[in-house]
Image (cartoon, rainbow, N blue to C red):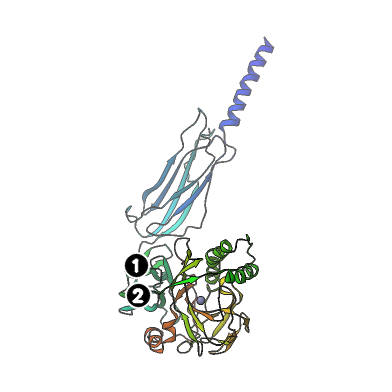
Amino acid sequence: MRVALAGLAAAFLLIVGILCWSKFERHGPRVSTSAAIQVLGRSTPLDFDVQSDAPGLRSVTVRLQSGGTTYDLLSESFPAVSWWRSGVLQKRLHVEPDLVALKVPEGAATIDVSVETYAWHLLPVSHTPRLTVPVTIDLTPPKVEPLTTQHYVRLGGMDVAVFRQSPDTVRSGVQVDKYFFPARTGLFTDAGVALVFFAVPQDLAPDVRPRLFAADAAGNQREMYLPCEIKPRHFAERTLAIDDDFLSRKVPEIAHESGMPVSGDLVQDYLRINRDLRQQNDARIRQVTAHPAAQPLWDGAFRRQSNAAPLSSFADRRTYTYHGDVIDHQTHLGYDLASLKLSPVEAAQNGVVVFAENLGIYGNTVIVDHGLGIFTLYGHLSAIAVQPGEHVKTGQTLGQTGETGLAGGDHLHFSVLLSGVQVDPVEWWDPHWLRDRVTAKLTMFPRAATPAGAEHNDEQARPRDSTPPR
Ligand SMILES: [Zn+2]
């Protein structure tokens, strides 16, 4: 009898023990945010990571408390998969609440995250939120006011806009389809005046409408169309016949310089150079031009290589043939200039060398920073005479022309880049264009002696999608 009672008691304790082990949490549920939340705008994305021990989460509720009113932002339940558990031990929750639609007032507020689990509790369950974050609600987008009037841009060219932005602006610029051109402040004594160089890149349609853009710390955005007339143009079409002599001279040289493995099939290796390596090289160009000088370093029009005849102009549409068959199409971004072999290559303007080495299809290459996002590129050199970090003057020798990279003969490949995007160099060679479009804007207001925070927007005009501009 005693033995039986003891056995019953042991069995009871075992069941209680199993229940305790399975239904009581050792720790309470935990909530964290993946990023610091301080200011909430019109639709700020919020992410929460919620964790629990067995038996798992029952529900998570995210609320906003403001001025005595509670706004439900998110509520998610996790159904039980058996009599005792949901089995959901961790969950990332994402919400982008529309605070304007919810009519949340601006000012101080708190975010509360409450969590329920399937655990039993010996003491009454506390309804205290698991996470409380004090925030400020800001639903007012920054203000922008254009100070330049009508803009005229040639497709593939660029212009400069000056505008006033409210002090809460943290990011501003001009969006042209998939390209974003960052604005710069600190150039003028009036800290509220910003200046932006923007291009209408050659691969866009001429009916694109550039938009002035500003955002504040809460992510509130202001956008307006810039009055802009875009002049369409037809780019030249050229056919280049690729022969075996060219392939056997160029493919091994470029593959060797770039560390690219070769398959032995010259045409296939050539196509990988013309397509993949070209893209890699252009990505490298965007990388080395990402942090321009915050002041204009140039003084007057850009110099065009002396006594050189143009071989091809900006944005030629090229068709490549081999034994009469079309094998590739590419756009030639730059200007090809030829004179005597091994001619000295002249710096187009004052600037700082940021790149001086081999760059795949461009061969031996020098890139010079002229400030405010403007760079020049010199390709196919047979010799380089400068080093990164070196200050150069207009006309100074950067090296010697040659035919390194994808060049069939001795010439200079010259490019002008704005925020990593190739623009037509012809504009920068024209003193009238430079005076009316650029210098006039840079002198609209008294200039600051030393720029303060002049480089707060130093990212590139990278397309929003992952495809590099071709
Ligand atoms: Zn070229």
Tag shown at residue 338 = none
- Mark 2: give few (<14), some (14-19) or many (20+) Cα within 10 Å: few
Residue named by callout 2: 233
Q: Is residue 347 above or below residue 273?
A: below
Which residue has dot 1 on it?
A: 223
For the N terminus, give its image quadrant: top right
Mark 2: which amino acid?
Arg
Asked whether disc 1 touches disc 2, contact meaning CB atoms under 8 Å apart, the reply is no
Whole-percent x and y of residue 282? Answer: 52, 69
Residue at the outermost front position: 323
Task: Locate residue 23: give its quadrant.
Answer: top right
Q: Nearer the viewer, residue 154 or 381?
A: 381
Q: Identify the mark nearer the N-term, 1 or 2.
A: 1
Q: Is residue 193 above or below residue 168?
A: below
353 sits left or right of 80 in the view: right
> x and y percent of residue 131 in the render?
49, 49
Mark 2, secondary structure of its residue: loop
Label 1 element class:
strand
Q: Is residue 170 visible?
A: no
Q: Nearer the viewer, mark 1 or mark 2?
A: 2
Query: How far is the residue under mark 1 from the one under mark 2?
Result: 28 Å
Query: Of the residues shown, which amino acid type is indicated by label 1?
Result: Glu
Q: Position of residue 416 (x, y in %)?
A: 48, 79
Q: Is residue 382 above or below residue 180?
A: below
Name the residue rendered at 46%, 37% in the picture: 78
Residue 85, image x, y percentages:
52, 32
